Amino acid sequence: MVRLHKGDKTLSYGETEKDIVKYLPNGETIMSVKMLDNGGRKILYETSGWYYIEPTDKKKGVYAGDICQICNKGELVDYGGCATCNNCNAQLKCGL
């Protein structure tokens, strides 16, 4: 899995980089690409700034800490006995 983010905001998760390319600025000039120690990259766009593509060991699932299967942007947290997405608020598994 890879994570695309801008600052602290996750834009998307994907199985490969091809899955997240559509979330990068379209038609904008790339000013710089830097390789990161973790195997990821950071890309500087002319007007949008830095975007980061980094590998992650997270997986899509229904438990706290997994990636949301609905929006592919949030992570599931335990909220009131339910695994709830911190982005779209979908409740994927409840122990009630």
Image (cartoon, grey):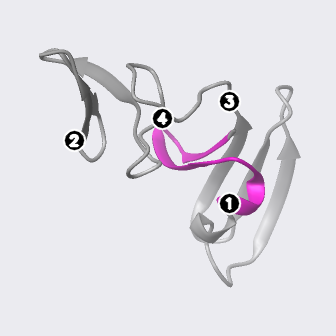
Q: Are marks 4 and 2 in contact (CB under 8 Å)?
A: no
The N terminus - image quarter: top right
Give the mark nearest the N terminus, 1 or 2.
1
Q: Which residues are magenta?
A: 2-20
Q: Residue at x 71, y 46 (%)?
A: 53
Viewer-closest of 2 and 45: 2
Q: Are marks 2 and 3 in contact (CB under 8 Å)?
A: no
In the image as oriented, which residue stretches furthest toward the front?
96
Q: In this rendering, would 65 be left or right of 3?
A: left
Viewer-closest of 89 and 22: 89
The residue where tag 3 is placed is 56
Q: Are marks 1 and 3 in contact (CB under 8 Å)?
A: no
Report, in whole angstroms, how far the alpha carbon at label 2 lies from the one at label 3: 22 Å
Q: Secondary structure at mark 1?
A: helix
The residue where tag 1 is placed is 19
The type of residue carrying mark 1 is Asp
Report, in whole angstroms, how far the alpha carbon at label 4 lies from the one at label 2: 12 Å
Give the mark nearest the N terminus, 1 or 3.
1
Q: Secondary structure at mark 2?
A: loop
The residue where tag 2 is placed is 89
In the image as oriented, which residue stretches furthest toward the bottom?
27
The type of residue carrying mark 4 is Ile
Give the mark nearest the N terminus, 1 or 4.
1
Report, in whole angstroms, how far the alpha carbon at label 1 lies from the one at label 4: 15 Å
Question: Residue 84, relative to residue 88: is it above or below?
Answer: above
The residue where tag 4 is placed is 67
